[in-house]
Image: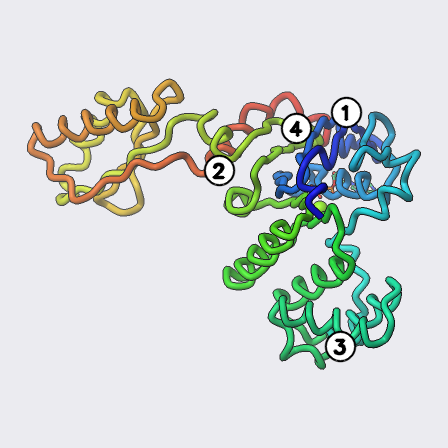
Amino acid sequence: MNQHATGVAIETHGLVKTFGRTRAVDGVDLTVPAGTVYGVLGPNGAGKTTAVRMLATLLRPDAGEARVFGHDVLREADAVRGRVSLTGQYASIDEDLTGAENLVLLSRLLGHGKASARRRAAQLLEAFGLTEAAERQVKNYSGGMRRRIDIAASIIKTPDLLFLDEPTTGLDPRSRNQVWEIVRIIVAQGTTVLLTTQYLDEADQLASRIAVIDHGKVIAEGTPGQLKSSVGAGSVHVRLRDAAQRPEAERLLARALGATVQLDPDPVGLTARISGAETGSGAAEHASRALAELARSGITVDNFSLGQPSLDEVFLALTDHTTTTTKEAAA
Ligand SMILES: Nc1ncnc2c1ncn2[C@@H]1O[C@H](COP(=O)(O)OP(=O)(O)OP(=O)(O)O)[C@@H](O)[C@H]1O
Ligand SMILES: [Mg+2]
């Protein structure tokens, strides 16, 4: 199992897929290290599912190259198929069967004997918190249960590479957490996970590296920390004792930080973005000078915090940049 934890799981060069005039995937270069969760982050229509389907050999690329564990997705599709599994809109669950029946059936199809198939099904139902729902028809499952049985079905035979296409879209926070926990367990067992998501916090929670894609192109790539520091050091949030002092505080902060200051919906709250030039301790130093300035002017600060930018801010900053250059291509 450990041999999969090193090396490269996926490598693509100039991968392209067009549908009519839409360049769904428009020259994507990716390198996914084995043994990690790799996040592919992008809004609706960015090209995530199309990219995953090409990597899983379900769709032919129009141009470029893609290798999975060194196997070409076109010329060595069988070798690729033997090592990957896909969870997404295309799961092979039968809604009329119970959760247990589905897993037993799929295990049998993968070559397990009767007893072994039952054992594997029970083990997965237990691991995914579905033991109580085991004898219920899947059509009566909640969204979160359904997502979990989908993932369970895709790892009956532990794949070397698992594609999870938006595994938590539409789930409530508790179900999302359960799915995240499952992903962590799967990776700890040596499987590489390529996770697509529209949620930046999800990529932040799970992925060691992230590719941000928009209109079929990778617009940024790196660790969550690198992506965040690429758009600036973060923000200072300040809460005042007295709302009447806010206009004065806004003026002083803007001057001290050389930044635009936003007024929060909370009438005593202000938020200032610290510029990209200020990093690490520089940002903290900058912020504390600004706070001292407020104190000198007799403005009481109840509390403050210095935060890294969220991936949401990163995403907005990145997609703003590319709006004008790539929007028409996808229109
Ligand atoms: N079979 C198809 N025929 C025509 N156009 C397609 C097809 N599949 C995808 N597209 C188009 O390709 C683009 C990328 O779609 P894709 O499904 O890959 O996006 P996505 O990032 O997975 O979006 P979502 O987050 O909504 O799932 C979209 O403009 C979509 O309309
Ligand atoms: Mg999709």
Q: Quadrant of the C terminus?
A: top right
Calculate the distance from the C-alpha at mark 3 to the C-alpha at mark 4.
Answer: 40 Å
Residue closest to the far top: 277
Q: Give amino acid for label 2.
A: Leu
From the image, tell me which residue sits under label 1. Answer: 13
Please tell me the numbered disc located at residue 98. 3
Quick one: label 4 or label 1, which is nearer the N terminus?
1
Question: What percent of the width, then of the height, locates residue 121?
Answer: 74, 71
Q: What is the x, y in percent for residue 162?
A: 72, 49
Q: Nearer the viewer, mark 4 or mark 1?
A: 1
Regarding mark 3 in the picture, which secondary structure is present there?
Answer: loop
Is 96 above or below relative to 271? below
Judging by the rendered image, the residue that carries numbered circle 4 is: 218
Asked whether mark 1 and ligand 1 are closer than 8 Å, the reply comes as no
The residue that mark 2 highlights is 311
In screen coordinates, is 265 left or right of 191?
left
